[in-house]
Image (cartoon, rainbow, N blue to C red):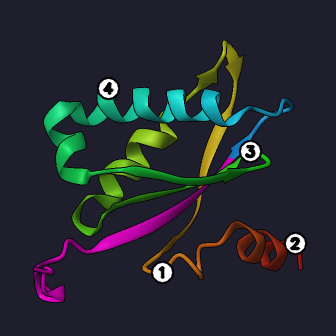
Amino acid sequence: MKLISALKPKKRYIVFQIISSQKYSLVEIKEAVESALLTFLGQLGVSKASPLFVKAKNNNFIIKVNHTYVEECKSALILIKKIKNKPVIVKSVLTSGTIKKASLDEVFSNESK
């Protein structure tokens, strides 16, 4: 039996950019993101926000979260100051309700124009 759409949790896709002189692997970015979310939101907050790492490419990544926890997740991730003991700046680029609008190719090709 399927869940009716009104009962499904709403989601938002947040696109972030890591500004650094170094490229980071998917594993390194994931570890930093999970650590920042746990530190800022705690276990209960993370379970309610239900973040899901969607995609990463060239120091840019997309994370899917519950629609009521968008601002909290942005705050948590912007507080990342180091990855692998190298200073970084994490910048929130876009928040979208659909994965198509948040796709990394679309976002960063439009930004360069």
Q: Which mark is residue 59?
A: 3
Instruction: Confirm or deny contact between disc 4 and disc 2 (CB under 8 A).
Output: no
* 79 or 108, nearer to the observer: 108
Q: Amino acid at mark 2?
A: Ser
Element on which disc 3 rests: loop
Cβ atoms at labels 1 and 3 below 8 Å apart: no
Q: Is residue 111 magenta?
A: no
What residue sits right under mark 4 in the picture? 39
Tag 2: Cα neighbours inside 10 Å, few (<14), some, or many (≥20)?
Answer: few
Task: Give me the C-alpha separation between circle 1 and circle 3.
Answer: 21 Å
Q: Residue 102: horizontal and vertical position, in percent?
A: 59, 73
54 relative to 33, above or below: below
Q: Amino acid type of disc 4?
A: Thr
Amino acid type at mark 1: Thr
Identify which residue is drawn at 35% across, 50% down. Answer: 51
Question: Which residue position holds label 2?
Answer: 112
Q: Quadrant of residue 3?
A: bottom left
Q: Residue at x 61, y 22 (%)?
A: 82
Sequence-wise, which precedes: disc 1 or disc 3?
Answer: 3
Q: Give whichever of discs 2 and 1 has the lower sequence position.
A: 1
Q: Nearer the viewer, mark 2 or mark 1?
A: 1
The segment highlighted magenta reads 1-17
Q: Is residue 2 magenta?
A: yes
Direction from residue 54 to residue 6 in the image, left or right: left
Q: Could you tell me how far apart the alpha carbons at marks 3 and 2 are, in whole angstroms?
A: 16 Å
The C terminus lies in quadrant: bottom right
